[in-house]
Amino acid sequence: MQEWQNEQPIIIKSGRGCLLTDIHNKKYIDGISSLWVTIHGHRKKEIDQAVSRQLKMVAHSTLLGLSNVPAVLLAEKLMRIAPPKLSKVFYSDSGSTAVEIALKLAFQYWQQKGPKFGTKTKFISLKQAYQGKIASVSWELQRFKELKHVGEVRQRGFMVGIELVQDRLTKKPHPLENKIGIRVIMECRKNGLIIRPLGNVIVLIPPLSISIRELKRMTRIVFKGIQHVTSSS
């Protein structure tokens, strides 16, 4: 909090795609998806239009004992593409909880089928199941392993953690009072990239809609930011 009070804050006025623009018209790649726009980024035309239409009718209606028109229309669309025997829709509040509920329902179904199905407890999953951009991210991250102050590069799909250390071989960490993570992300901001640190780990979570060109620019900025900050460490 003290660091934030001493900084000149970035005031964002607009965004489009994976780019944010501040009140001085400087553009930044949104390398953390503003935490909530992880798929389409900012100002997706179809989403803006749908939100605008809905706000003219009602902003929120609970599904606790009720339903609403968009929920019914979406349920009808889902049933048209689902297998014939799936004729009910259960809504959750987010993608992660929806997946969790689906797993629990599938598990409970087989448990209730009878004792001979009790061993059906395994799930098949796809690792990093999102088109070719993930391969591009992985390729761009390879060169970070050459930096002597990078201890490890962790990746799950588009989520990346770059751990900064004093020595790559021993993995000796930087003292937290050195604020190495904060210094790197502040250097990246100067060059048009907004990211965040978790201690000594640099976190990247760009929107899935980011272009290959923007991905390469993002990783270049981070690479140079780490080089610049750690050269004096």
Image (cartoon, rainbow, N blue to C red):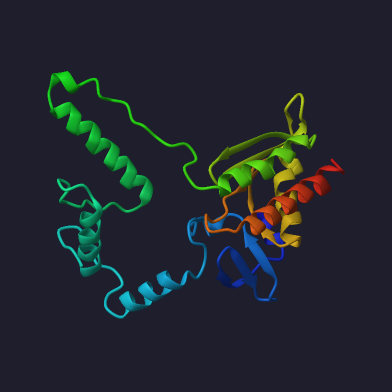
Spot the residue most to the right: 232
In this rendering, the answer to whether 41 lies above or below 45 is above
**Residue 28 in view, yes or no:** yes
| Point 52% across, 67% down: residue | 42
Q: The N terminus is located in which quarter? A: bottom right
In this rendering, the answer to whether 137 lies above or below 34 is above
| Point 77% across, 46% down: residue | 226
Residue 17: x, y in percent? 55, 66
Q: The C terminus is located in which quarter? A: top right
Left or right: residue 174 versus residue 82 is: right
Residue 151: x, y in percent? 71, 32
| Point 32% across, 40% down: residue | 100
Residue 153 position by quadrant:
top right
Residue 111: x, y in percent? 18, 27
In this rendering, the answer to whether 109 lies above or below 198 is above
In this rendering, the answer to whether 152 lies above or below 169 is below
Residue 57: x, y in percent? 27, 78
Of residue 71 and residue 4, the one placed in the foreground of this image is 71
| Point 70% across, 38% down: residue | 142
**Residue 62 in view, yes or no:** no
Residue 59 position by quadrant:
bottom left
